[in-house]
Amino acid sequence: MPVLETIGFDLGHGETAVAKARVESIEPPEMLEVNSKKVQVTALGWHPELGYLVGDQALIQAGVTQLEIAFKQRPNADLNYRKTIRHFLETYYRLLKESKQMEGGEDSQFFVGCPSGWSINDRQEYQKLCKEAGILRLSVVPESRAAFMQAKEAGKLDYDKLKSSVLIVDIGSSTTDFTLVKSLHEIPMDFGSNALGASLIDKAIFARTLANHEDKELLERVFKAYPHHKARCELASRKAKEDYFSNEQLYSHPQSFARGFESINEQIYFIPQVNKVIMAEILNQPLSELEGKSWMQAFQEAVNEAKETLKQQGIIPKVVLMTGGASRMQFTRQICEKIFPEPNSQVRPDPEPERCIALGLARVGRWDLRAAAFKKEVNQRFDSQTLKDIIERHIPELIALLATPLSEGLIENAVKPCLKDWRNNKLRTLADLEDKMKKQAEEWIKSHRARQIVKNQSVTWFNSKIQPELAAETDPICQKYQIPRSSLRFEEGIDPEVVNPDLSVGDTILADTVMFIVNVVIGGGTVGSIIALILTGHLTWPIVLVYGVSVLAAGVEITRSKTQEAIKTKLDIPGWSRAFLLNDNKLDSTCEQMQPELEKVFREQLTENQEAFDELIEKVGQELKKALNAKAEEAVILIQ
């Protein structure tokens, strides 16, 4: 049953957001709402009468007796963690279905995000855990991939940048992940233990507020007995942090504070507050979770390490794409801009990091499904036999294109120079002429010039005969998936100097064709045929007419074959008469008469050498298949 919609589920350590995309549409995904909000705190509460509540409702509903926040982590065997994830997803799924914002069941496929630093095994375990919530179709996707896809489809990355190197810096609540996207492939950059999450700043604000609270000891007892109160106070600390970073200039005055608020009871309040001075202290204080480094120091070192790792590979990212809620913190952008300065790199924070991953996950899901269908259609349309049939149909045109320039080249570079040498007494007999001509013909057919002729003619043949047939098949596919027709065309031809270097079809067609022609000309008897043409009518009989008596006196029976052999091996024609027998006009006339006959020999030998052509067709067909698949892989990034 085909999937109708993809659901991007961004279950974050701090916030959760959900988006939906229709598979058969290229319209942007839409954000879905739970509790009338598109983005809300990742929180799961238990109410004795209402059951499980999520997001803000779990925080504000009176009577909630259990509260879990910031529970996203690597999958593990902890039963409480597994139960929390399952109930959170179950509740979200139910609310989205009840509000009819999604189809559900087999019609909807969920794409849940995870940090790019998670291993494949982590993703698989997380996928199993998420599926325990009863969601039939569910996949786990790296959040960095979602950020890249969102930037790409929202028009923030042009095609050149898509194909180059993009560094994604995902600053989340629990981790900061670095991912290199090179030639459209994601490469997570693992710097070891990754605990650099923005929630550490929340905890530092919480700890500072608690340490300075007049009812510190009482609060500690309350937090121990009623963990949900502690969770609420941690959220208030986070609220203070977010308010501060949303307008840092406002809180630069010593008497101005960004505040959070939580009421424990009518007499006890927890009010975390920060301003520029306090935040500077928090960002620069040593943290045990970061091995004694401050948050700012650890982030700067991580970005520097990313740069050094890329430098060792000779990579300078064209774009540094910042995402995750903490990318709103101005100092993180300043650090990235300092370490990756323009014009070599452009630092681009996502304007809506709280929605970016959800939208990107929905796009990734839709893209995955459409890309898979696209590649399948290309494969089905161009099976190996189809390509071989196209090539085989046009072999006669290739032969016709090769015969004339090759025969002209052989005459000009082998026949004529050798005949001049014989005329000028540099060769004694016609047997010597034959040996020299064979050698010179072989040298020329292997020369760069001859190979270039074959290459040029093969390029003409491919571009005029093969490419139009391929385009007739690929254009409808491109139209169906709404990508440019050029995506699957070899519009630049197959000349290796202009074709995409990743596609070796040009090199293969040309190299195989050149070797094939060389083998036919040298090994297939074409050189021998040149001598036969010279000694049959073009040169032999004029010699016989002048020197017939001498030939008879030598005891040679005048039959065509024996006369040719005798003249070739025994007759040393006097130098003074050679210029008469083979003056310039006669030499040009002989070569001119030979041209169409040599062309005919070429065509016949190429046509008759079907077995070798079968091998060429097979090789070219296979390489063309590979090239089309490579183009399809390259083109899928354009699919929306």
Image (spheres, rainbow, N blue to C red):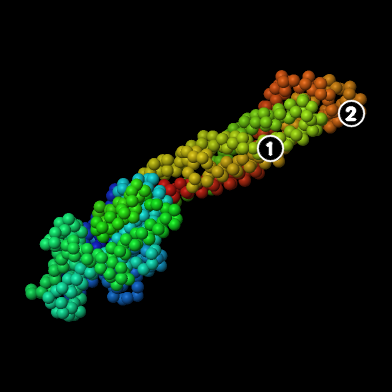
Which residue was labeled with disc 1? 443
Residue 331 on image: x %, y %: 26, 58
Residue at left offset 35%, top offset 75%: 77
- 504 left or right, relative to 82: right
Taking depth in this image into account, of 66 and 220 the one nearest to the observer is 220
Residue at left offset 38%, top offset 45%: 160
The tally of labels here is 2
The disc placed on residue 199 is none
Residue at left offset 42%, top offset 40%: 486
**In this view, the mark in front (1 or 2):** 1
Give the distance between the C-alpha atoms of the residues marked 1 and 2, in whole angstroms: 35 Å
- Extreme-left residue of the structure: 266
Q: Residues within 10 Å of mark 1 (few under 14, many from 20)?
A: some
Q: Can residue 174 be seen in this view?
A: no
- 295 left or right, relative to 415: left
Question: Label 2 is placed on what type of residue?
Answer: Val
Q: Residue 290 occupies which quadrant of the picture?
A: bottom left
- 388 left or right, relative to 152: right
Secondary structure, mark 1, is: helix
Which residue was labeled with disc 2? 556
Q: Can residue 293 be seen in this view?
A: yes
Residue at left offset 56%, top offset 35%: 456
Say whether marks 1 and 2 touch (CB < 8 Å): no
Secondary structure, mark 2, is: loop
